[in-house]
Image: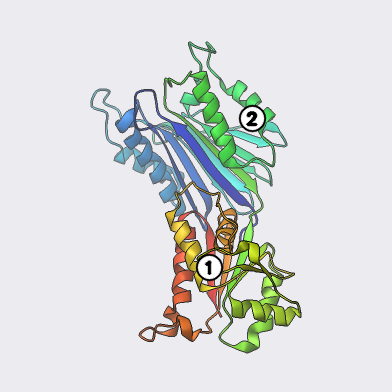
Amino acid sequence: MSELFVEFAYAQLPKWGEELCGDSVSYARGKQGTIFSWSDGLGSGVKANILSTLTSRIIVSMLMKEAPLEEAIETIVETLPVCKSRKIAYSTFSVVQVTSTGEAYVAEFDNPPLFWVRNGRVMHVERHKHEIGKKVVLDFQARLQKNDWIVGITDGVVHAGIGGLWNLGWRWEKIASFLESTVNEHMDAEILANKIIDTTQRLYQGRLGDDATCIVAKIRLPRRLVLWAGPPEDPSRDEEIVERVLQFPGRKVVSGGTTGNILARVLKKDIRVDLTSLAPDVPPVGIIEGVDLLTEGILTLSTALRKLRSMSDGERNIRGHDGASRLLQFLLEADEISILGGRAINPAHQNPKLSGELSLKARILEELSEELRRRGKIVILEYY
């Protein structure tokens, strides 16, 4: 589990009259930390989108494989298609790499300088020039801390309002002032990105003269959750697992009737049933001191998985007070999720044609983990 977490979001709008945005954003998280890049392709529309997509994806994928930035830029130069009319292959880029301890590396080529916000103020940093592949790249390193923000923009944001509401456009300095008056620790990255793009659209009076993109990274402590689903194969480990769940530094969810009874026995506490959470297809949740949520097992887990699969990638708010809805809301709000799957098999859930490891519960936990990872969650699934 990481020490600091990068909450990442972006918002963008295409140039007026274009269906595709000519800016692109790429993002990845791995052992090298969190890496994200954004690029503004030459012109607008499909060609610009191709140029920028290749640029941002190549940079992120190569840095994730520990390739030096110089090699990534050389690859971009060799890969980008050449514009037939202008005889050049051109796209800007910015890339940010943040480790779990907050060490950050930033490199920029022809994009507006990004904003680093700390304690409500935009930090001013000295950038260093490097010539890489005949491109002048500016870079700097910084030590980020909790509640810092990194905000990146493309030219379309800086130029918002030119010839209209503001003759000189929004400009970098005005955007910096906007950030200083807007950012607060209770705001999330998605809200801030949308605020900047909404303001950009208003300044253009709805007719954008250029593609506009805003990238936001909020540095904060990770939101952690442990989900204990099923008794351990060895009953002598019951107390060990209960202790691990209770000592977990984050939200605690227990799934399954037998699992809940083990928790109640070890804690010597009674379980109360919350009948207000009863739904036609989901049993009611239980209430017991020491955990944030206690649900039924297979039905609740499978319903939560089905609901998750039916949601769009950006959707986060769940309607409903039933156990599956509440479990899913907890999972979507978490950044790092530890799932403790019990190997003890309930005969009612076991297909005799399958081995114990392929029980229905195990398959649901595996599929739930994969779906959460696809949505950017860090998920560790262990069995006992």
- Please provide percent x and percent y for residue 159: 49, 20
Q: Is mark 1 on a helix, strand or loop?
A: helix
Q: Amino acid type of disc 2?
A: Leu
Query: In the image shown, does 24 or 61 lie closer to the viewer?
Result: 24
Q: Residue furthest left?
A: 84
Q: Which secondary structure lies at badge 2?
A: helix
> Badge 2: how crowded within 10 Å, few (<14), some, or many (20+)?
many
Q: Return the disc, 1 or 2, that comes first in the chain's sequence.
A: 2
> Which residue is the extreme one toward the right?
268
Q: Where is residue 353 in the image (x, y as percent from the top left)?
A: 35, 85
Mark number for residue 153?
none
Amino acid on which the number 1 mark rests in the picture: Thr
Circles 1 and 2 in contact, beta carbons < 8 Å: no
How are the colours assigned in the image? rainbow
Residue density around tag 1, few if under 14, some if 14–19, many if 20 or more, within 10 Å = many
- Where's the N terminus, which quadrant? bottom right
Residue 128 appearing in the image: no
Q: 234 or 162, which is in the foreground? A: 234
Depicted 33 relative to depicted 214: above or below: below
Point 58% across, 41% down: residue: 189
Residue highlighted by disc 2: 179
Is residue 159 among what the camera can see? yes
Q: Above or below — where is 43 with respect to 229?
A: above
Rounded to the nearest whole Å, what is the CA distance between mark 1 and mark 2? 42 Å
Residue 26 placement (x, y as % from top left): 44, 44
Nearest the eye: 215 or 100: 215
Mark drawn on residue 300: 1
